[in-house]
Image: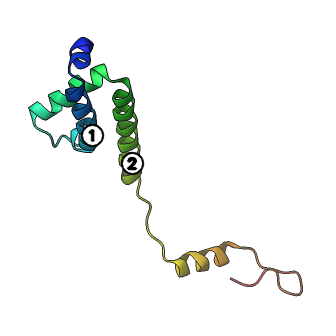
């Protein structure tokens, strides 16, 4: 397969560009079988594109995990008030304020 790429450098360069521009669509499952095959064939013989695809796949996976661990939204004022309530206060006499 590597030999075929060397014999057709123009095709290799086109597939290299295609892989880079369609990587996200490939990972999202949005490409048809011919385009998926084109990317898979190219990444088998192009180590830089294989590394690119692997890195992009890890990034997409990590971002997906962030989305699944949502934290409840708290307004700024609610957050400040909660911190003030939780903070120990001492009045001039050294005793905490009444609750």
- The one nearer the camera, 94 or 8, is 8
Q: Earlier in the sequence, mark 2 or mark 1?
A: 1
Q: Is residue 55 visible?
A: yes
Residue at horizontal 27%, vertical 40%? 23
Q: Which residue is mark 2?
A: 63
Other residues around mark 1 within 10 Å, as few (<14) / some (14–19) / many (≥20):
many
Which colour assignment does the render follow?
Answer: rainbow
Quadrant for the N terminus, please: top left
Question: Looking at the figure, which quarter contains the C terminus?
Answer: bottom right
**Residue at point 14%, 40% (across, down):** 31
Q: Residue furthest bottom?
A: 92
Q: At which x and y percent is residue 35?
A: 14, 34
Mark 1 element type: helix
Seen in the image, is 3 located left or right of residue 84? left
Rendered image: mark on residue 15: none
Q: Quadrant of residue 3?
A: top left
The residue positioned farthest toward the right in the image shown: 93
**Res. 23 mark:** 1
The quadrant holding residue 85 is: bottom right
For image coordinates 37% across by 34% down, the residue present is 52
- From this view, report whether residue 45 is shown above or below residue 84: above
Q: CA distance from mark 2 to mark 1?
A: 16 Å
Residue 91 placement (x, y as % from top left): 83, 85
Q: Residue 15 lies in what quarter of the image?
A: top left
| In this view, 89 is above or below 43 | below
Rendered residue at 22%/29% (across/down)? 10
Could you say where residue 50 lies in the image, as x and y percent from the top left? 34, 27
Q: Does dot 2 land on a helix, a strand or a loop?
A: helix
């Amino acid at each position: 397969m590597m030999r075929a790429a060397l014999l057709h450098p123009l095709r290799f360069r086109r597939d290299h560009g295609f892989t880079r521009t369609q990587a996200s669509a490939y990972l999202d499952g949005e490409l048809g079988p011919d385009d998926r095959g084109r990317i898979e064939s190219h990444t088998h013989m192009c180590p830089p594109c294989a590394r690119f695809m692997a890195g992009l796949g890890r990034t997409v996976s990590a971002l997906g995990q962030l989305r699944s661990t949502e934290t409840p939204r708290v307004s700024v004022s609610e957050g400040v008030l909660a911190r003030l309530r939780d903070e120990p206060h001492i009045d001039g006499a050294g005793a905490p304020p009444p609750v």
